[in-house]
Amino acid sequence: MEALRGIRGLAVDLDGTLYVGDEVLPGVMAALSALRAARMPMRFLTNTTSKPRSSIVAKLDAMGLGIEAESIFTAPRVAAKVLRGRGVKHAYFLLKDAVLSDMEGIESTADGAQAVVVGDLGDEFSYDRLNCAFRLLLEGADFYALAENRMYRHGDGMRLDVGAFVRALEYASRREATLLGKPARAFFETAISGLKLNACEVASVGDDLEGDVGGGQGAGLRGVLVRTGKFREEDLSASEIRPDVAIDSFADLPGALGI
């Protein structure tokens, strides 16, 4: 496709793009093989904040995707780098305990927290946890969100995502969270920095119109929307975001790139 002419690297979403739940989507294995055979460098980006990168790598291995840990960029790991750079040593995390291993160098505490960091607690979200975060924000703690996704597709259907809880805290505290995951420009820039390519030579591929397509385009990448995962046709028609290319699934990507 003309819109993808000159693409020399990819920033690929995981859940909803390569797989849903524990099932690899049809044609993904063949597409990955074709892209690897063509020596197309890829970085894999995920806003998943419910599990550490080590668990994501293990899941990908179990599904036979064979994606190396070094090419996977998660919101918590990118956020930890940013927070350390800003001098944050103590933070209150709305995160599952297992994910705290990705927040290296930052102590998890409510006592003297310099920042509130909101990620995915899933069923562990509670009034008490949210209220503690709210009070810290009123006391002046910095406010960060690892993601602002509205929803995601699980094996049992669509589920409410972390963005709803971020908005609740913003509304109550009259504070605005600084986003550190997709669609933040810094997230994409960090992920593709090792490719040694100009942003316009990289395509962001995913099922999230706002996070993957709009976020990628905001960082100078080209946006490729796949009609799998959380994609809904009504979202595309209602949004001002326009992908450079829309394809039915990741399986169609090599053809779209002329591979």
Image (cartoon, rainbow, N blue to C red):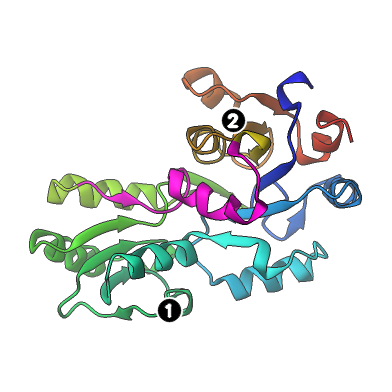
Residue 104: mark: 1
Occupied quadrant, residue 63: bottom right
Characterize the local packing of mark 2: few (<14), some (14-19) or many (20 or more) Cα atoms within 10 angstroms.
few
Q: Residue 118 in the image: x percent, y percent?
A: 33, 61
Secondary-structure class at tag 1 = loop
Residue hosting label 2: 232
Q: Residue 188 colored magenta?
A: yes
The answer to whether any part of residue 231 appears in the image is: no
Q: In the displayed structure, would residue 50 be above or below residue 43?
A: below
Viewer-nearest residue: 204 or 170: 204
Horizontal side of 146 relative to 156 (left or right) equals left
Q: In the displayed structure, would residue 178 be above or below residue 99?
A: above
- What amino acid type should be assigned to the residue bearing mark 2? Arg
Occupied quadrant, residue 87: bottom left
Secondary-structure class at tag 2 = loop
Picture residue at 15% right of the left edge, 60% below the top: 137
Compare marks 1 and 2 and give the one earlier in the sequence. 1
Residue 184: mark: none
Horizontal side of 116 relative to 5 (left or right) equals left
Q: Residue 251 in the image: x percent, y percent?
A: 82, 40
The residue range painted magenta reads 176-199
Q: In the displayed structure, would residue 10 be above or below residue 57?
A: above
- What amino acid type should be assigned to the residue bearing mark 1? Glu
Characterize the local packing of mark 1: few (<14), some (14-19) or many (20 or more) Cα atoms within 10 angstroms.
few
Viewer-nearest residue: 12 or 248: 12
Horizontal side of 197 relative to 189 (left or right) equals right
Q: Residue 179 in the image: x percent, y percent?
A: 36, 50
Q: Residue 91 in the image: x percent, y percent?
A: 26, 73
Picture residue at 57% right of the left edge, 54% below the top: 191
The CA span between labels 1 and 2 is: 37 Å
Which quadrant is the N terminus positioned in? top right
